[in-house]
């Protein structure tokens, strides 16, 4: 730090390693997916020499993959909605609760994040399987004769994914509610507003940024989830992310797998953009 | 009345959050040869099986090693970036934050695919653990960055200036003044990085080299073909290991975690 110019540029050395890492190992690799999706299929190697549009033609021409994208999006929507319905009350309770058990409740919400995703999915296979805890208990109680089909179908995937991503819905909404001035609620209460009215007219609109963040996070994560759909869905129900990974790892169809991955990413991205536009418009209108 | 309904509703959700974890822990003490419910008696049998199973022991070692190496790398790079972000970024602040958080915002499966193609394109491939470590560093970097930069927000640059006027060099100022003050953020970030790395699945799955399966991958491979309670014993131990890391760090180093 002797000359003026090295003095001014010295701080850049702090950000340089991160910038280089992100450029070389994130930006360039993402560009390589795009390039890969235009490659020709290879003979004995993951991809060939030339370039082609055939991967996209195959993707858009095959009703199997289009149906799979639709199914994956539906799973994403249901999970997001379920997480919102389950997460909002808990987020509100955590943000506004005064109970001494609040710390414990917070720990319960964070606990799934400390347990690996493979282990959580495994827990759901123990619960949902035909010989699993839920079916055995219900049969033991004489409520059902045959096991309910809870695993190897879309329902099982939705249940497990909702569990896996629930903390990602609760935490942003909780911080949003914590940021709302409690005196607004007291004022509304003193003017005779019921609890339901306070939630609908004050908490809900003001916590919208948190709700929006939670919904986007949950939706994106459930579209790209691999382990949970793979373990719960087995070979019977495959989400798009599972198909993509299989195409790449098991059958080495790198170019086609890239086209599938980008198809899913672009669809998901468009939905997220539309969703954030729409929610921003509605809460500004209020 | 509505208050009771609300509390019960919340309690059910807490039970839902804990259920799969408790069920795995419970299943690990099952004496039977298969995962059955109700369990056929209590036993530590499957823990014994696990401790004689070299495959799982090697996987745990690999996981700990990968987590330690990536935590050190992202701890250093992330802390440096956080210092730049809080003290020098100026108008670039928003851009730097988005770039640093990008690995967390992008779908992990897409990042894994991207890295797989890239390491093959540049000729490194997945023969070594290089690709896997790079992936872990990318994913854990945002956690270090966000924790350290939150601590730094309350650090007054005047302290550094005072030290400088007394003749302290840049590195001394960092080591003697700034680092002790932002220690909880650095430790919290590194702890989170370690735990996240220990659990990363998709990146490791796509970038693993032969014989370097981490614990989540070994567990997943095992679960696709086996149904013995051994997997439950392995899972329980992994959960306990994570808890030990959290408790020890909190006890001896002090801790403050900022996640969002």
Image (tube, coloured by chain):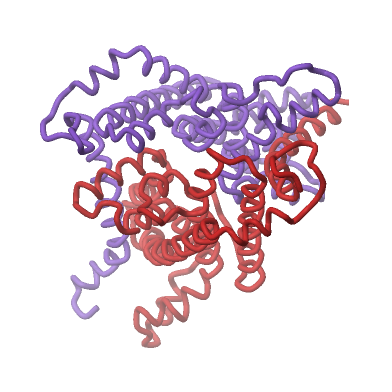
Quarter location, residue A16: bottom left
Toward the left, the furthest residue is A50
- Residue A146, horizontal then vertical, whole percent: 74, 17
Q: Is residue B228 above or below residue B51?
A: above
Q: Is residue B249 above or below residue A86?
A: below
Quadrant of the rendering where the N terminus of chain B is positioned: top right
Residue B81 visible from this viewpoint: yes
- Residue B198, horizontal then vertical, whole percent: 51, 55
Q: Tell me what residue is drawn at x 49 percent, y 30 percent.
A: A219
Horizontal arrangement in the rendering, residue A197 relative to residue B3 (left or right): left
> Considering depth in this image, is B135 or A119 the residue closer to the camera?
A119
| Palette colour of chain A | purple
| Figure chain in red | B
Q: Is residue B139 above or below residue A96?
A: below
> Considering depth in this image, is A126 or B153 the residue closer to the camera?
A126
Q: Is residue A46 above or below residue A62?
A: below
Total of numbered circles in the picture?
0
């Amino acid at each position: 730090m002797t000359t003026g110019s090295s003095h001014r540029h010295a701080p850049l050395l702090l950000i340089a390693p991160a910038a280089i890492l992100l450029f070389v190992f994130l930006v360039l690799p993402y560009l390589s997916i795009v390039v890969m999706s235009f490659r020709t299929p290879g003979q004995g190697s993951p991809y060939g020499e030339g370039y082609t549009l055939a991967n996209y033609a195959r993707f858009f021409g095959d009703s199997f993959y289009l149906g799979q994208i639709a199914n994956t999006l539906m799973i994403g929507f249901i999970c997001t909605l379920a997480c919102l319905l389950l997460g909002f009350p808990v987020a509100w309770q955590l943000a506004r609760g005064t109970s001494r058990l609040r710390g414990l409740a917070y720990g319960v919400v964070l606990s799934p994040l400390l347990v690996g995703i493979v282990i959580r999915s495994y827990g759901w296979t123990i619960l949902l399987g035909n010989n699993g805890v839920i079916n055995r208990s219900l049969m033991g109680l004489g409520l059902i004769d045959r096991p309910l089909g809870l695993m190897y179908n879309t329902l099982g995937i939705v249940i497990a994914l909702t569990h896996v991503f629930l903390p990602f819905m609760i935490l942003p909404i909780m911080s949003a509610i914590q940021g709302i001035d409690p005196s607004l609620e007291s004022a509304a209460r003193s003017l005779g507003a019921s609890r339901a009215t306070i939630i609908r007219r004050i908490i809900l609109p003001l916590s919208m940024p948190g709700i929006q963040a939670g919904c986007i996070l949950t939706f994106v994560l459930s579209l790209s989830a691999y382990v949970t759909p793979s373990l719960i869905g087995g070979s019977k129900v495959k989400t798009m992310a599972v198909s993509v990974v299989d195409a790449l790892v098991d059958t080495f169809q790198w170019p086609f797998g890239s086209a599938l991955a980008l198809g899913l990413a672009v669809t998901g991205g468009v939905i997220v953009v539309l969703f954030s536009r729409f929610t921003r418009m509605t809460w500004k209108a209020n | 009345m509505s208050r009771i309904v609300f509390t019960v509703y919340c309690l059910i959700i807490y039970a839902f959050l804990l259920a799969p974890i408790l069920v795995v822990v419970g299943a690990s003490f099952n004496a039977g040869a298969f995962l059955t419910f109700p369990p056929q008696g209590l036993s530590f049998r499957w823990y014994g099986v696990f401790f004689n199973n070299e495959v799982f022991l090697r996987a745990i070692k690999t996981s700990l090693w990968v987590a330690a190496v990536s935590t050190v790398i992202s701890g250093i790079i992330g802390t440096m970036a956080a210092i730049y972000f809080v003290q020098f970024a100026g108008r670039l602040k928003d851009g730097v934050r988005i770039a640093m958080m990008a690995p967390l915002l992008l779908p992990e499966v897409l990042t894994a695919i991207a890295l797989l193609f890239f390491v093959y394109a540049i000729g490194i491939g997945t023969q070594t653990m290089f690709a896997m470590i790079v992936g872990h560093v990318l994913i854990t970097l945002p956690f270090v960055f966000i924790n350290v930069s939150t601590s730094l927000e309350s650090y007054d640059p005047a302290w550094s200036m005072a030290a400088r006027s007394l003749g302290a060099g840049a590195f001394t100022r960092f080591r003697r003044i700034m680092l002790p003050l932002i220690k909880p953020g650095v430790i919290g970030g590194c702890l989170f990085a370690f735990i996240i790395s220990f659990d990363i699945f998709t990146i490791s799955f796509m970038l693993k080299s032969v014989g370097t399966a981490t614990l989540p991958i070994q567990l997943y491979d095992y679960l696709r073909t086996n149904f013995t309670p051994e997997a439950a014993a392995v899972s329980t131990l992994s959960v306990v290991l994570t808890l030990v890391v959290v408790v020890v760090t909190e006890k001896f180093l002090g801790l403050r975690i900022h996640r969002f």
